[in-house]
Image (cartoon, helix red, strand yellow):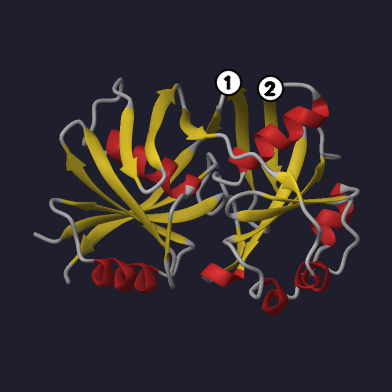
Amino acid sequence: MGIPVFQVDAFTNQAFAGNPAAVCILDTPAEDKWMQNIAQEMNLSETAFLYRKDDTFDLRWFTPVTEVELCGHATLAGAHVLWERGYLPAEEVAKFTTKSGLLKAERKGNLIELDFPAELENAAPAPPELLRGLEVRPKYTGKTGADYIVEVESEEILRGLQPNFSELAALPGRGVIVTSRAASNGFDFVSRFFAPRVGINEDPVTGSAHSSLGPYWSARLKKDEFLACQVSARGGVVRVRLYGNRVYIGGEAVTVFQGELSV
């Protein structure tokens, strides 16, 4: 039999929206080169590889060009597959052993809530490549361990960005989170995420970015729960709540297709 593979749209309740991720369920660990080749073949922003190890699942994520240490939407997609396809009882918390430590996911009705570490940012000057890449005057610029975070004056400015990806690819780290207060009804803040350095010009919905966006907006809006929207072309809705040094990132997911890898 082949290796089960699924494509799941994450942070959406309808197909062809949110962020698509591939999910491969393995019986044993796989070689890095093979996983990278599969991710390149799937050609999605992330492909997740899982195999059961005692009471947890080992989880790794690959873009088409490299492995990454943390990914939200592919974790949500992986948890969705585990419950939907009977790899894990619906009432059981999904536990993942990753390069970012132990991560968890829990079903809450139609919502899947990820338990991620909070990622705090510090104010930092905007490098020339960042300014040339975004062609906008930032209201604020900061740096997390992996990403730059840039606040702009309005949702209109955010939606209108047309980045120079070759400039952004020259920045160190993973990518650039751009955010603003929301003008759209019902949302607290909006964002976009650019990561050409790791092979993703614009990510449709980036769960892991909300590990930074949650604490960032909590300090400014003086609240701990948010409804956020990532305003990419596909778009997606993310529920965010803070508790201590953890950020709980919630969203829905839809399986688009399933198949088998024969290599």
Residue at coordinates 32% horizontally, 38% vertically from top-left? 96
Q: Earlier in the sequence, mark 2 or mark 1?
A: 2
SS state under label 2:
loop
Q: Nearer the viewer, residue 149 or 24?
A: 149
Q: Nearer the viewer, residue 86 or 211?
A: 211
User: Crowding at label 2, few (<14), some or many (≥20) Cα neighbours within 10 Å?
Assistant: some
Q: Where is residue 212 drawn, in percent x and y?
A: 64, 41
Label 2 sits on what residue type?
Asp
| In the depicted structure, whether residue 263 falls above or below residue 69 | below
Residue at coordinates 43% horizontally, 41% vertically from top-left? 76
Q: Nearer the viewer, residue 32 or 93?
A: 32
Q: Is residue 161 visible?
A: yes
Query: Left of 9 or right of it: where is 53?
Result: left
Marks 1 and 2: in contact by CB < 8 Å?
yes
Q: Where is residue 141 drawn, in percent x and y?
A: 80, 52
Q: Which mark is residue 72?
A: none
Query: Left of 250 or right of it: where is 68?
Result: left
The residue indicated by pointer 2 is: 224
The residue indicated by pointer 1 is: 243
| In the depicted structure, whether residue 123 falls above or below residue 176 | above
Residue at coordinates 49% horizontally, 35% vertically from top-left? 116
Identify the residue at the far left of this view.
1
SS state under label 1:
strand
Quarter occupied by the N terminus: bottom left
Q: Quadrant of residue 65?
A: bottom left
Label 1 sits on what residue type?
Tyr
